[in-house]
Amino acid sequence: MSADVYSAAADEGCHIFGTGCGFEAPGTELFFPKPWVDFGLPGTAGITKYLLLLVVAFLVVAAFWYFTTRRSKVVPGRGQSMAELLVFFIRDNITRTTMGKEGDKFLPLMVTLFLFIFSMNVMGIIPGLQLPVTSRLTFPVVLALAVFLLWNTIGIRRHGFGGHVRARLVPSGVPVWILPVVVPIEALSNFIIRPLTHSVRLFATMFAGHLLLALFAAAGWYMFNPTSPMGPLFGAISVGYSGLALVGFLVFTAFELFIMAVQAYVFVLLASIYIGEAMEGAH
């Protein structure tokens, strides 16, 4: 969880079976850290924790590729084997299943996109960092818009502007008389809802997951009161409650790590499906 929740609970001295205030669940303030440097430019947030974690995620991905491929051999070592397993996994389960062998040329992009998104997600469970970059809507939106632009660019280059737009707006086999209804729906679905859901899915999952982790951690701290003024019995009960919250926090952290990988996979899978659709043309 965010250090802000820890400090708030500690400063207020809020504990169960105590004489202080009641429990206050962490809120959305976790996702709006104060900027360290504010340039005062409209539409910018300055230098914040998100920017720092974005750089850290980038360095993690760069370091992964550097240390796993700097001494590539015909018989791979552990690091190279790990990198190759990742590449083969993305190729066999995403690019080739959605684009065929032609999708191999997009394999570097998809592998990098998967690693980058996963690294940004993992920032949410690393002690001392504990804030997933993708819990800020701006970052998933930028990634989704990049995929959206690539999808349109490939479609236009393959089939021309008219051919690409027609393929997206006029499904094959639809009777002419129903096109006035279908075309607006297809336009809304492909050119507005598609990039929106592509970004919001990742953002919403990371936002909710991090908030739930923060709730477990804050509740565990609130229920830890071994020196309760109500007596040693209540102090022991509070420690038991806190222990249960800790177990829940650890279990959900492991589950959240799995969800982080799944969300990176889903984002890349959808991106690959969109690109494959653009190359195919009519649907």
Image (tube, rainbow, N blue to C red):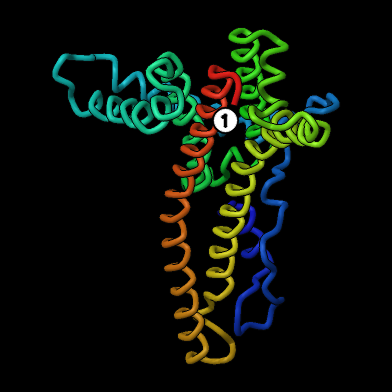
Residue 20 drawn above or below residue 68: below
Q: Is residue 242 left or right of residue 152?
A: left
Looking at this view, is 175 or 10 the one in front?
175
Residue at image point 14% right, 19% down? 75
Looking at the figure, which quarter contains the C terminus? top right
Within 10 Å of disc 1 (Cα), the crowding (few <14, some 14-19, many 20+) is some
Looking at the figure, which quarter contains the N terminus? bottom right
**Quick one: SS at disc 1?**
helix
Residue carrying label 1: 54
> Which residue is farthest left?
75
Kindly indicate the quadrant of the structure image that contains residue 42. top right
Identity, as a three-letter code, of the amino acid under mark 1: Leu
Q: Is residue 175 left or right of residue 230?
A: right
Residue 176 drawn above or below residue 131: above
- Report x, y in % for residue 182: 76, 35
Q: Is residue 132 visible?
A: yes
- Report x, y in % for residue 10: 62, 64
- Report x, y in % for residue 231: 53, 92
- Report x, y in % for residue 161: 71, 10
Kindly indicate the quadrant of the structure image that contains residue 8. bottom right
Residue at image point 72% right, 37% down? 193
Q: Is residue 138 visible?
A: no
Residue at image point 59% right, 31% down? 52
Residue at image point 71% right, 26% down? 170
Residue 227 drawn above or below residue 89: below
